[in-house]
Image (tube, rainbow, N blue to C red):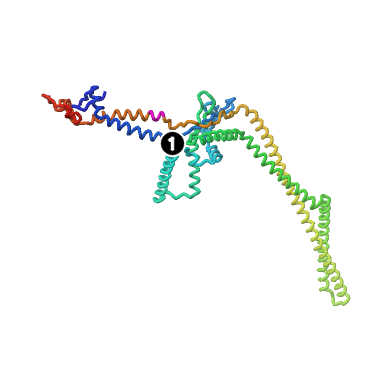
Amino acid sequence: MPQGPVNDGEFEPLSLAEIVAIYKRWYKLALYTFIGILVPAVIVIFLILPLYEGHGSVWVDRNNPAVNFSARADSGGSTTFRNVNRDEEIATTAALFKAREIAENVVADLDLTMEKLNHIRDARRYVQMVIDGVIDTARAVYDGIKSLLGLGIPLTEEEKAELAHIRLVDEVIDRIEVAPLADSNVLGVSFRSSDPVLAKDMVNALLDEFIEFFSTIREDRANQFFTESTERLRAELMASENDILNLQIESTNFMSSEQEGSLVLHYEQTKEALRRLKIQEARLQSQVASNRENLKKAPNSVNLREALQTNLVNLETELAALQAEKRSTMEVLNEYKRDLDAIAAVNLELRNREREAAILEESYQMNVRNLEKARVGQAMSSASISAVRVVSYAPYPLKTVRPRKLLYLAIAFIGSLLVGLAMPFLAYLNDRTIATEADVRKYLGLEFVGTFPLYDSKHFGKN
């Protein structure tokens, strides 16, 4: 029961007549308070931005949980493997729905922008425009103040576009809700938007994108690795075999094996002939030197000196012819040597390429065997690895999840009524005026011999 005004530190209970008198005195305050709260509340309720929610669902099929493991690194550096239970796997699948790659692909597929994300189909779009305008203005003022104070640098148009894209993707991720349904392997997927069509399209696009994404991450990594490695080795092996073939063709065109053998024989014969020529040259040089000494020491006999002179000329002529033959033989020998060196270089390159091709062939065959093992292992385990299937796509949402107008109106009415009923008592508790005989007796302690009735102008003169 409400209490009366304070009197000597004690609260006095109010009688029913006093309560009725309080409401009769301050009924206008109660009425104005009720209307003053209810009317703005109703206006705000009808201006609250609408929010629709699209719902879809997927089924996480887990045939054999024993094949899935998770790794946890211990503080000592070792790794512990343990089974992934049902709840963890379903929670992991739910978390994957918010992968940024999926959100990026959905935004690209639907050509989504912030304007489309916040699109409203009725007059409340003007409220959204005002809110967006206020936010954009506050953000621009904040960035401008930072630039003026030297706390930041102005963003370029490319940076602004990238920042807007990041905010869009973050907003999409924030609106995605994924939760497992009770006692089941079914995940409910929802997306909220002020546009019901967009809410439906976003959920359906998320489901399709996630199925594709999940099938990609389920690929066996060993299979992928050995496939890529085998293709690379195969290309390298084919290139090496082509190089060997070209070198063989070049070697065959350059000289046949019979010609190579004949060249080696001619080279050895020429080398031997050059050796003999050098011996003859040395002998003739010795004879020429000896004849020159004899010619210097010979007596002045004319016949003897003429004979020695003639013999010396013959020896010098023979020596000159021998030296010319020697030079010619050396040129032929050098030409033979160049041809043999060229053949040796081609053969050496050919042997090196053949060794490289043999190593590549061995590596290629090993990767082929490993690839087959990886494919067999994947085929054996594919039946026991979790799969995700779409149970239902999102239908068109007919009702908003916000605002719930009837509920909000009921709350506003009850709240306004309670505040309106409380206001007269607040006014009474704060009232210090003396209005009745009871107040005089209470506060002044005086008794009355008689009282005059209250003057009422409406009834005065009727008696």
Question: Residue placed farthest to the top in the image?
Answer: 16
Residue 348 placed where, x, y %?
74, 49
Report x, y in % for residue 17: 23, 23
From where the camera sits, is residue 75 visible?
no
Q: Residue at x 55, y 35 (%)?
A: 205
Q: Residues within 10 Å of mark 1 (few under 14, many from 20)?
A: many
**Quick one: which residue is furthest to the front in this view?**
462
Magenta span: 406-410
- In this rendering, the answer to whether 111 lies above or below 451 is below
Farthest residue, direction left: 449
Three-letter code for the amino acid on which mark 1 is drawn: Leu
Residue at position x 43%, y 30% in the image:
404
Within the magenta stretch, is there residue 277?
no
Q: Nearer the viewer, residue 153 or 412?
A: 412
Q: Is residue 458 above or below residue 108?
A: above
Kindly indicate the quadrant of the structure image that contains residue 9: top left
Q: Circle 1 is placed at which residue position?
A: 49
Q: Quadrant of residue 412?
A: top left
20 on left or right of 52 = left
Residue 130 in sight: yes
Q: Is residue 381 above or below residue 103?
A: above
Q: Nearer the viewer, residue 282 or 429?
A: 429
* Residue 334 horizontal/vertical position (percent): 78, 58
Look at the image and tell me in which quarter the N terminus lies. Answer: top left
Task: Work out whether residue 198 or residue 63 is closer to the camera in this orientation and state it.
Answer: 198
Q: Quadrant of the C terminus?
A: top left
Magenta residues, dominant SS class:
helix
Q: Secondary structure at mark 1?
A: loop
Residue shown at the point (58%, 27%) measured from the top left: 61
| Total numbered circles | 1
349 vs 415, left or right, is right
